[in-house]
Amino acid sequence: MPRFILAPSAASDVESILARSFEEFGAEAARRYEALLVRAIADVAANPDRPGIHVRDEIARSACTYHLAHSRQNVVRKSMRVKRPRHFLLFRVGDCGVIEIARVLHDSMDLPRHLPPELLGE
């Protein structure tokens, strides 16, 4: 069974993303984005070598990113698909293959500025 861990900073990111989505676009949009987040996490946990994953050793050892747009078509109900996702997962594959999701960031953010210390191994 694929497993993942959502770091506290990633959980906070998700809460903020969904709250902002609700405030700006309404309850249905927030539900769609939540479905996409769940799908993207499940996709990465099922196959951490899937297309769309980028190894980002230039920012932190073993760091990877995965843009939610790569999972958009995997949301089963077409009516629940997000047209233009704007976030990506920042993660690494930890011990025993557990996916450690460190952050969920907007794609316009300066990635190195938002790296959590645990991902840097410090």
Image (cartoon, rainbow, N blue to C red):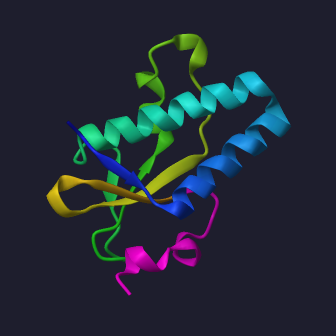
Q: Camera-side residue: 73 or 26?
A: 26
Q: Camera-side residue: 96 or 111?
A: 96
Q: Residue furthest right?
A: 23
| Left or right: 41, with 113 as reference point | left
**Number of numbered tags placed on the structure image:** 0
Residue ID at (15%, 57%): 96
The part of the image, by quadrant, that contains residue 114 is bottom right
Residue 122: image location, x then y, percent: 38, 87
Residue ID at (75%, 43%): 19
Residue 90: image location, x then y, percent: 44, 59
Q: Residue furthest bottom?
A: 122
Residue 42: image location, x then y, percent: 36, 36
Residue ID at (52%, 32%): 36
| Left or right: 81, with 24 as reference point | left
- Residue 40 within the magenta-colored segment of the rendering: no
| Left or right: 98, with 15 as reference point | left
Q: What are the residue bounds of the magenta stretch? A: 104-122
Query: Quick one: quadrant of the N terminus?
Result: top left
Residue 26 in view (yes/no): yes
Q: Residue furthest left?
A: 96
Residue ID at (58%, 33%): 34
Q: Say above or below: 67 vs 101.
A: above
The part of the image, by quadrant, that contains residue 24 is top right
Q: Say above or below: 100 vs 23.
A: below
Residue 59 in view (yes/no): no
